[in-house]
Amino acid sequence: MLYLLLLSALYNYRAPLINKIDPRCYENEIVHAWVYFTDKGITAEEINRVLEGIKRRMNYSSINRRILRKSQVYYEDIPVKEDYIEEVIARGGILLYRSKWLNAASFLLNRADLEEIAKLDFVYKITPVARSKNIREIEKSVQQDTGLLTDRQLRMFNIDSLHKLGVFGSNVRVGFLDTGLRRKHIALDSVKVIAEHDFLSGDQIFMEGNPVTYQYGVYTSLLFKSTSNRIELFAVGDTYYLHQPTRDVLYTYSMDNGATWREMKNLTNNFNTWVTELAVCGDSPTFVFYRDRSGIKFLTMDTSLITQPQNLTSGLSFREPSAVEIGDTVYLFYQNKNRLYLRKGTSNGFNPEELIDSSGSNIKMPRAIGGDFKVGIFYYNYPGDSIFFLRDTIPVSSFSKKFTNLIGKDPSALSSGDTIFLVYKDASTPPLLRIGFTKSTDFGQTFKSPLILSGELNSIGKVSIARIQNQILIAWENEGCIYFRLSFDNGNNFGNLDSLNKEFVYLPTLGVVAQEFKKFYCERGDDNTDDTTYHPRHGTEMLGLVGGYSPDNYIGVAPGAQFIVAKTENPDSVYEFPIEEDTWVCGLEWCEEKGADIVSSSLGYTNWYHWPEDYDGRTSPASIAAYEATKRGVIVVTAAGNVAMPQLVIPGDAQGVITVGGIDTLFARWEYSGYGPTYDGRIKPELVCLGAAPIVVNPDSTNSFLYSFGTSGATALVSGICALLLEGHPNWNPDSIREALIKTASKADSPTDSIGYGWPDAVKAFYYTSPIGGYPLKKNCLLTPFPNPFIIGVHKNICLPFFLNTKTYVEFYIFSISGKLIKKEERTAQLAPGKYTDTDPASLNAGFLWDGKDMDGNFVGSGIYYCLLHTLSGGDDITKVVVIK
């Protein structure tokens, strides 16, 4: 009864399905699956405080878009509860991606582990991750090499008329979920990419920003160790056996303090037994303990194996090995639910296990340390999150147990003599966590009052600690970012918060090399979406349709827009780790976090989904995620699919998105354009656009072009039109955009299943209500400066925004009223057409910013100053500003 009452108090709790496991999960020995959770571990009383914390940490662009479009921060924005993910990992799951919107995470699971995972009370259901339907689109070379090649595709939808008014999609962020971007073509040299990430390139271990390993697979553990003549890294990572993924202990070392590293070596060759946990101790030899599907094992090694892996326990119930070597003896601790065990041993073998503690609740994360002729072990209990410490003198006979008065998780400690330095995840303000630090000078008999080193966080990943004399460095991971705090006085005080300033990084691991702190970490993917292995062909063609610009022959729909590029798919070859629906969902959530106003996607999923009953907008994870994006003010534009029958592809059935089919140049439906309606009776596609065949850039050329056949091109064209509309109506939300496009489309009064409401008219949609922004803008010009007057000492800069009607180089000049040159600035690259109004100098859309100083760095006097915009394409403008000193 108490358990049921606790469940009823959880906010937005959904009761588990009676049959949690989708039968299709059993079809293969290794399944790529979504594990959905019942809740996020938050009560109704806690929800508002948690949401306020989420809002404080959100990207400015994301929160600003939500405010502008009258959206909000939702329960679904809260991250997945880490405790739930850890329990799935403990039962053999390999974590791939988290989705806060779905309250789920994707894992590689062994078929034999499904039942144990399904027994977890907080697991709602387990379903396969759908694989993408490859983009099969025809391309033909364009023979014409003179004139404006895009003239027809712009005029068909009145896009050219908006360009003549000065509308180019300025200050609108368009996200692309596709195959990446190659910038080789001349029409792409002024594309404004503000964020880029390759979700497919695998994990890579770094030391201080320098790669230690190649990109490959997924790492789940990382440990640092040093000896007298080398530094070493141990990891749990992906390997293959008979074309099936498996997990092994991997090892590398450096003899020159990290300048060069040996190639990663597989220590375990586990075939299909999947390593999940890892511990290392000792010098000569090194002991490596790990847990796989058959239990806890150990091996000994130098730079190569000395003894082969040997069993210490059997079965998955023995978990979380932690070991310390004191003298010639290794003390190995591990837990089995609510029991804590010790085994003592040497390289010759280990004594039988001893039960040293039991608890009324589960024992979690035992961590062993050594002192002066003493050995100790931390752990926390769950539920309860109370941290305990057990200690004994050597030779050990009976451990004494002490509650540390700390409420927290995942203790991690190091020692110097009898002084213990302890970092942990403070859980005293549930459901949020903080980083806590304390120390003991009497080997755990007493602990000082803890210091809190972070704000309240929804989740914390790995925590690491290292020490050099009186310096202590602590690192932790939070939602794909790594943070640090450094103390110079042995942990009495800590400096300001620092960070790695990177995304998609995890497993922070601190080491000491030549008396310097070294930061090791793992990075998932990278910010280069143009690689030689997986060609970004399709993504380049689609982004070029929107953002491409070469004045003489090629003009995209919205060349003034800014772009967020997520490489989430690869139709060109078979990737070792399948490109599937979870990657798309992760990319979509990332685009939203980066402040995308629009997300364009041509990806389609058909595997696992049955037409038409599963196409209701509420069944597939991708469709649910697409709808969640629209709730946050993101316009999602997706393809109807290239099929030869009445059918859509996922997420074309999603609610709130704009699904786009294809037509030819005579405005007739393209014969392979998918269509609905959806299972619940909604018209899909809503719109059609040119699918047979818009002209796209040739990604492998600098100046040639292709015809592209498919609904992908139609989708990109509509995405570009949406960017034009948002420039004039920045507060329009997805419903407003849909209404303006649908009500002004060619078949607004007589929609059909096959072409929806027809093809869009960009001008009519733009003027569906009156735009803001002072249109038309027909020539290169300066816009209204601000603040004006500019008061030195009060204002940091004066911004001189400007507009360009074509791609060009620009120069700025400031003159005194007497004609003396005060300041000059040149933009080193050609700028795309559109408005440049941002006050952030790092922005790709920055206006000209003047700090009131002359070329010698001195503030100018009060007076009137003339500002000149000079463009190399022709067309200058001048305005004046007032400076008050």
Image (cartoon, grey):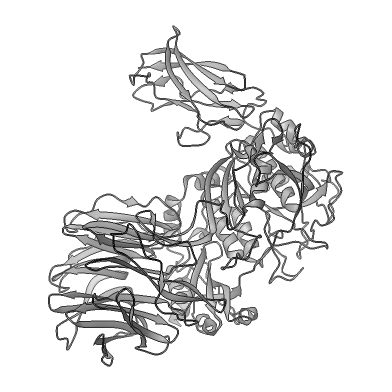
The answer to whether one can see residue 302 in this image is yes
Residue drawn where x is 59% and y is 80% of the image: 21
Horizontal side of 447 relative to 257 (left or right) equals left
Q: Quadrant of the C terminus?
A: top left
For residue 648, which quarter of the picture? bottom right
**Foreground of the two, 30 or 106:** 30
Residue most extreme to the top = 818
Place of residue 217 in the rendered image (x, y in percent of width and height, measured from the top left): 50, 67
The answer to whether one can see residue 357 in this image is no
State how many labels appear: 0
For residue 718, which quarter of the picture? top right
Q: Is residue 816 above or below residue 229?
A: above
Place of residue 702 in the rendered image (x, y in percent of width and height, measured from the top left): 64, 40
Place of residue 787 in the rendered image (x, y in percent of width and height, measured from the top left): 46, 24
Residue drawn where x is 60% and y is 43% of the image: 184
Q: Is residue 820 above or below residue 75?
A: above
Residue drawn where x is 15% and y is 73% of the image: 443
Horizontal side of 188 relative to 508 (left or right) equals right
Q: Is residue 126 above or below residue 174?
A: below
**Foreground of the two, 5 or 703:** 703
**Foreground of the two, 58 or 428:** 58
**Foreground of the two, 467 or 792:** 467
Q: Is residue 159 above or below residue 76?
A: above
Horizontal side of 851 relative to 618 (left or right) equals left
Place of residue 151 in the rendered image (x, y in percent of width and height, measured from the top left): 77, 35
